[in-house]
Image (cartoon, rainbow, N blue to C red):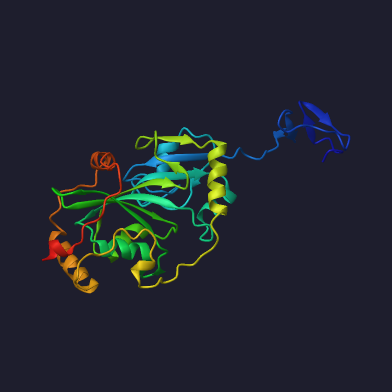
Amino acid sequence: MVAAGRVSVNGKRITEIGTSADPDVDDIRLDGAPIPTTPEQIYVVLNKPIGYVATVKDRHAAHTVMELVKGVSGRIYPVGRLDVDTAGLLILTNDGAFTERLTHPSHQVPKTYRAVVRGEVAEWAAIDLRKGIMLDDGMTAPAQVEWVDFDKKNNATILDITIHEGRNRQVRRMFDAVGYPVLALTRMRIGPITLKGLVPGGWRKLHSSEVKLLLAEADSRPDARPQRPPEDVEEIDNTSLRPKSSKAPTEIRAAAEALTRSLREGSTLHRSGATMSHVMGRKSAGRKQLKASSQRAK
């Protein structure tokens, strides 16, 4: 191509093989057309509102997250999942290797969600979530669960839950499995990245240092398939939420599920941006202990 005179540099035809040029500075063309260069790697973090599908295109969706990042130059795509009914952190990029390292099951980057669930969550339920829950697609890895608040008026518990997997609607299914349906859900953190400073629908580019931290987080977690842990709650880390009731766990579970069913249609807590903003501002200064459900079930 060079010998044939098809290549030009800064408007000058090059015919001598071995002529050097800098693609970052020089205008290099083949047959008069610019030679494509490696695109700039873009990393964006978005605070996704409810109602937007985390995909590039979906003819069945009313809105996709791409509508919110129109100001980004270059083609980017979402990293992982975030349900249409779930708000919060979503990373978008054009870096395929970065996406693979963050989403591959062997890396298990932690993701923290703030969940509003119907009912007053019993201690046995928190322990079950921490040990792992059997879902229809297998056992979940142990989750971290922290109590935030209880909304007595709306009969709703607010908790933070951290998981290391990325299954479809996983957090919702985990709470369903223990009898506490999710009313609202917001992803608050992915590894070291948080929602701080991002309004719903807002986005910003990740700093190179943040990208490095995310990759370091991904590489620091070896592959570990979830195993069914021992039944003895004494061996669970952070066991401040052990049941205090003398009733058997199955009795507590049955009573809690009956209470949940009776309230399934009665909650006045709505999944709205205003509600979640109110909920997110109610985190207490310290961790509190979940109350046992036995007193409510008597």
Q: Say which residue appears at 57% left-offset and 48% top-offset.
A: 216
Residue 32: where, in percent of width, then height? 73, 32
The part of the image, by quadrant, that contains residue 172 is bottom left
The image shows residue 15, relative to residue 174, as above or below, that is: above
Image coordinates for residue 283, horizontal then vertical, percent: 28, 43
Residue 64 in view: no
Q: Residue furthest left?
A: 298
Q: Position of residue 46 (x, y in %)?
A: 42, 40
Is 35 situated left or right of 268 in this image? right
In the image, residue 296 above or below residue 114: below
Q: Would you say 290 lies left or right of 57 here?
A: left
**Is residue 158 at all visible to an observer of this figure?**
yes
Q: How many marks?
A: 0
Q: Is residue 122 left or right of residue 224?
A: left
Residue at the spot 35% in from the left edge and 45% down from the top edge:
52
Quadrant containing the C terminus in the rendered view: bottom left
Query: What residue lies at 34% left-to-right and 68% top-to-bottom?
Result: 233
Pinpoint residue 228: horizontal percent, then vertical percent.
Answer: 41, 72
Closest to the observer, 52 or 112:
112
Image quadrant in which you'd find residue 122:
bottom left
**Residue that sits furthest to the right in the current view:** 16
Q: Quadrant of the N terminus?
A: top right
Farthest residue toward the top?
11
Q: Is 101 in front, or is 51?
A: 101
Location of residue 141 by image quarter: bottom left
Q: Is residue 21 above or below residue 296?
A: above
